[in-house]
Image (cartoon, rainbow, N blue to C red):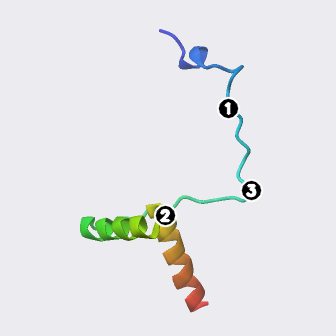
Amino acid sequence: MTNKHDEWDYEDAELHTGLTSPTAVYSIRFPKAEITAIRAAARVAGVTTSEFIRRAAREKASARL
């Protein structure tokens, strides 16, 4: 059995810089009909579903503060 690390190409590896600010991952459950509508709206807006949800959450939060 070979170790998967033995096959990695360390010499030509892509280097990625770290994130400039800490982030958190938050899991949210949506009913199928809601996430379908959210995905469609994100596509129309030209952003990812995640970015669409982040923007909506920031807008709602800033309106309440």
Q: Position of residue 24 (x, y in %)?
A: 59, 60
Residue 11: percent from left, percent from top: 72, 19
Q: Which mark is residue 47?
A: 2
Foreground: disc 2 or disc 3: 2
User: Which is more N-terminal, label 3 or label 2?
Assistant: 3
Question: How far is mark 2 from mark 3, CA to CA?
Answer: 21 Å
Tell me the amino acid under the disc marked 3. Answer: Thr
Give the residue at mark 3: 20
Please tell me whether residue 49 is drawn above or below residue 19 in the rendered image.
Answer: below
Horizontal side, residue 39 vs residue 23: left or right: left
Question: In the image, which disc is placed on residue 22?
Answer: none
Q: Position of residue 13 (x, y in %)?
A: 67, 27
Which mark identifies residue 14? 1
Where residue 39 sits, quadrant-wise, is bottom left
Residue 44 at x, y percent in the picture: 40, 69
Circle 2: residue type:
Val
User: Do we see residue 30 in this rendering?
Assistant: no
Q: Is residue 51 left or right of residue 23?
A: left
Is residue 21 something that shows in the picture? yes
Q: Count of labels shown?
A: 3
Compare residues 12 and 28 and report the one nearer the observer. 12
Residue 24 sits above or below residue 58 on the image:
above
